[in-house]
Image (cartoon, helix red, strand yellow):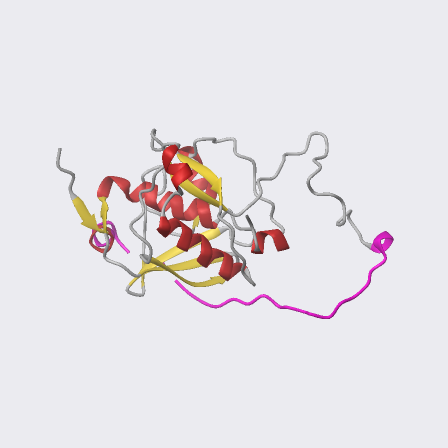
Amino acid sequence: MRFVRTSWAALIAGLSLVVTASCGVPVDDEVRTVDPAEVPYHLLDDTAAVRPGAAREVAGPRLYWVDGQDRLASRPAARFCAKAVAGVAENILDQLGDGPSDVDLSAGLGTALPPDGWLELVSITDRTAHLRVTSDDTIATNRVLLATAQTVLSLTSIPGVDRVKMAYDAEPLQVPRSSGELAEGPLRHDDYRSLLADPDEEPKDERLRRRDLCPG
């Protein structure tokens, strides 16, 4: 059977055509000593221990790969270190471009994404990751939804990123949600929840911690 493949740019042009700003994370190197008794809201409690009845939060960030049933399965990202959320997002995009590890491949996981370099992070503002499509690498038309879901689910697994916007040639880019409709605004985790191999996957920890900057 011969599969028809279309460049991402051409496909999106057929679907229709979202965009930018900048971001920064303040850093203060000054060391301060704080009396633990004065720290509010149990912020120094062991976060690995889960309170009875509380949902256990998934350690992030995660990578999402396609299983044999065209569902999205999450795996921990390979080890890296970054100084800010934007660096984490860039590492996640790089790892998505590299494809699944040998272990994940042997477990039957794959990817709908073209090779490394087809997506570039422009900025992160207001918890939204702005991406630019930078490649004309081919992608099967029946894999566009999965490729979009992999990107959105992986990036929104990062504490500090809740939404994803894509652009091509500086023009807003509309891509499909799992419902099949074209997105007119930012894409969110819940837009692709129905594609998860585990739809009851627990939520990410919303607080950005040192371990999120250097996971693995």
Position of residue 105 relative to residue 157, above or below, is: above
Q: Residue at x 50, y 57 (%)?
A: 88
Question: Magenta segment range?
Answer: 12-38
Q: Position of residue 3 (x, y in %)?
A: 16, 39
Q: What is the magenta segment's predominant secondary structure? A: loop
Q: Residue 135: which quarter of the image?
A: bottom left
Camera-nearest residue between 30 and 81: 81
Q: Nearer the viewer, residue 175 or 34?
A: 34
Measuring 43% from the left and 34% from the top, which residue is drawn there? Answer: 196
Residue 101 percent across, percent down from the top left: 40, 43
Residue 68 percent coordinates (x, y): 34, 30
Tell me, yes or no, whether the highlighted magenta stretch contains residue 24. Answer: yes
> Compared with residue 116, is residue 76 higher up or lower down, i.e. above or below?
above
Is 94 placed left or right of 8 in the picture? right
Query: How far across and how far down the image is residue 20, in percent?
Result: 42, 65
Q: Quadrant of the N terminus?
A: top left
10 falls in the magenta region = no
Residue that extends furthest to the left in the rendered view of this protein: 2
Residue 162 seen: yes
Residue at position x 36%, y 50% from top? 98
Residue 125 visible at all? no
